[in-house]
């Protein structure tokens, strides 16, 4: 990760059009899933992000070739020479755990360490491990290392998740695609990225049914062949751009997004007085001069309001008229942006999973430090509407999930420089 700083001269209105990048949370599991098919997978709309680069680094380390042509990534998984992922690659992001299911499905064995990633409180992987154990994987856990091998054969299982974990659902789907027999996941995560992964695997010849619903059924097949796939657009980047437009009283058009993926996000902006129009060429958001508070935002598994949009939307609520209560139900410690937002003059109090935001008329510029990916996005939104010049450090967090964000914002008329 490089170290960079954003210098934002805030208080400008945004206008114009922007194309929303491909989804990070689709790209990461799909890149791991390419391991299931011997040969060349072609992935379009694959965003240029440090987390995507971390996935490509893992693929290359184990012997695959991976190259990029613009937005397209081409991965050839024909020759693999290693069955382990070293700690420095595992620690680059939490999603590296998705390689567990993929390596097991293709090679019956893998050695890796526990993953790294953004600090959002404890992010356990117990559900991933117990599901794979039920499918016949023996997992040794010693000194932070996972030593996994298929004992007899990788087989289907009935797996009931106590919480609809996105990553666990994906790991199980990937492993089950090549397992013997049928796997049924109950209380599966229903995020659009789960559907995207299933679409890719099914295009490769997998038999995955019900992705996007609470019960997913996977009939294991003998082998998969590589496919061409286009990642869905990133709904969290869209929600971030909407927050930026709303907080700055702007009018922008986002191209390339799928409106149904934002069903729980649009009402928050409409309740704040923004006009959202779904057009053939994209989604337009027109913000009022002064926002109304969205009142109550509770993060929930999809189709509920996404935890990943909580931080950027909080920056918008910080300048809305009235009080907004946030309830963070997914992660225990996802308010690290709050103390930094207060430096801009925001009035926010946190108690446990609740944050109470009392909207102020305007934010003033500040020098702040990002501590996680979506928190970094929140600070950018705050700096865009704050009067004066702000400096945001820790931009390496932002770059895990936002592609050339300073360029996208500059094209909309913002004054953002990356140093
Ligand atoms: C994914 C997303 C992340 C998003 C999150 C929730 C990717 C790459 N990341 O993360 O952006 O914020 O979904 O929408 O897609 N849990 C356990 N045990 C486990 C796994 C999870 O207790 O084994 C808990 C977590 O602590 C958390 C909840 O389940 O409280 C949801 O986590 P999960 O859906 O697994 O998130 P990720 O897949 O890590």
Image (cartoon, rainbow, N blue to C red):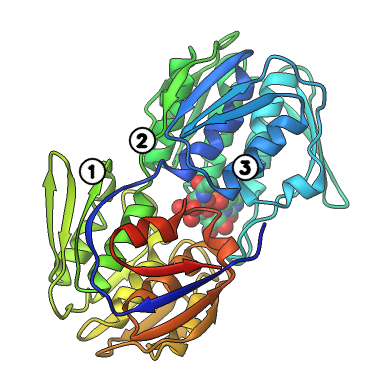
Q: Position of residue 99 (x, y in %)?
A: 66, 35
How far apart marks 2 and 3 lie (CA) works out to: 27 Å
Give the mark, 1 or 3, whose residue is nearer the N terminus: 3
Circle number at residue 53: 3
Give the label, 1 or 3, closer to the camera: 3
Q: Position of residue 126 (x, y in %)?
A: 66, 48
Q: Quadrant of residue 329?
A: bottom left
Residue displayed at 37% across by 27% down: 210
Residue displayed at 45% across by 81% down: 390
Circle number at residue 317: none
Classed neighbour count for the residue bearing mark 1: other residues with Cα under 10 Å, few (<14), some (14–19), many (≥20): few
Query: Which quadrant holds the C terminus?
Result: bottom right
For numbered disc 3, what is the local secondary structure? helix
Relative to residue 262, is residue 368 depicted above or below?
A: below
Classed neighbour count for the residue bearing mark 2: other residues with Cα under 10 Å, few (<14), some (14–19), many (≥20): some
Q: Which residue is label 2 attached to?
A: 212
How far apart marks 1 and 3 lie (CA) works out to: 29 Å
For numbered disc 1, what is the local secondary structure? helix
Left or right: residue 1 versus residue 167 is right
Circle number at residue 260: 1
Query: Which quadrant holds the N terminus?
Result: bottom right
Left or right: residue 391 versus residue 61 is left
Q: Quadrant of residue 287?
A: bottom left
Closest to the observer: 299 or 258?
258
How far apart marks 2 and 1 lie (CA) works out to: 13 Å
């Amino acid at each position: 990760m490089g170290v960079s700083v954003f210098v934002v001269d805030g208080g400008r209105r945004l206008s114009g059009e922007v194309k929303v990048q491909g989804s990070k949370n689709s790209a990461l599991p799909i890149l791991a899933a390419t391991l299931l098919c011997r040969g060349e997978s072609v992935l379009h709309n694959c965003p240029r992000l440090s987390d995507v680069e971390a996935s490509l680094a893992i693929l290359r380390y184990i012997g695959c070739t991976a190259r990029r042509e613009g937005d397209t990534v081409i991965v050839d998984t024909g020759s693999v020479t290693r069955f382990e992922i070293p700690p420095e690659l595992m620690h680059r992001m939490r999603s590296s755990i998705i390689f567990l299911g993929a390596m097991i499905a293709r090679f019956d064995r893998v050695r890796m360490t526990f993953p790294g990633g953004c600090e959002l409180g404890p992010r356990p992987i117990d559900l991933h491990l117990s599901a794979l154990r039920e499918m016949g994987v023996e997992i040794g856990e010693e000194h932070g290392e996972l030593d996994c091998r298929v004992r007899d054969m990788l087989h289907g299982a009935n797996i009931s998740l106590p919480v609809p974990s996105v990553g666990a659902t994906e790991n199980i789907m990937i492993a089950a695609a090549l397992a013997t027999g049928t796997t049924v996941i109950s209380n599966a995560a229903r995020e659009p990225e789960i559907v995207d992964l299933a679409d890719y695997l099914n295009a490769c010849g997998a038999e995955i049914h019900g992705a996007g619903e609470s019960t997913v059924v996977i009939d294991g097949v003998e082998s998969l062949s590589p496919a061409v796939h286009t990642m869905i657009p990133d709904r969290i980047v869209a929600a971030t751009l909407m927050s930026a437009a709303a907080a700055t009283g702007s009018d922008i058009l986002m191209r390339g997004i799928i409106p149904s993926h934002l069903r729980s996000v649009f009402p928050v902006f409409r309740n704040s007085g923004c006009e959202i129009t779904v057009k053939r060429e994209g989604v337009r958001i027109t913000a009022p001069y002064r926002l109304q508070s969205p009142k109550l935002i509770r993060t929930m598994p999809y189709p509920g309001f996404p935890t990943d949009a909580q931080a950027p939307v909080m920056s918008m609520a910080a300048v809305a008229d009235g009080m907004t209560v946030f309830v963070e139900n997914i992660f225990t410690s996802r308010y690290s942006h709050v103390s930094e937002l207060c430096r801009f003059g925001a009035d926010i109090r946190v108690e446990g999973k609740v944050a109470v935001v009392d909207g102020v008329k305007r934010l003033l510029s500040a020098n702040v430090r990002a501590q996680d990916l979506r928190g970094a996005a929140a600070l950018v939104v705050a700096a865009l509407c704050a009067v004066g010049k702000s400096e945001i450090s820790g931009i390496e967090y932002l770059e895990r999930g936002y592609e050339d964000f300073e360029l996208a914002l500059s094209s909309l008329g913002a004054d953002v420089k990356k140093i």
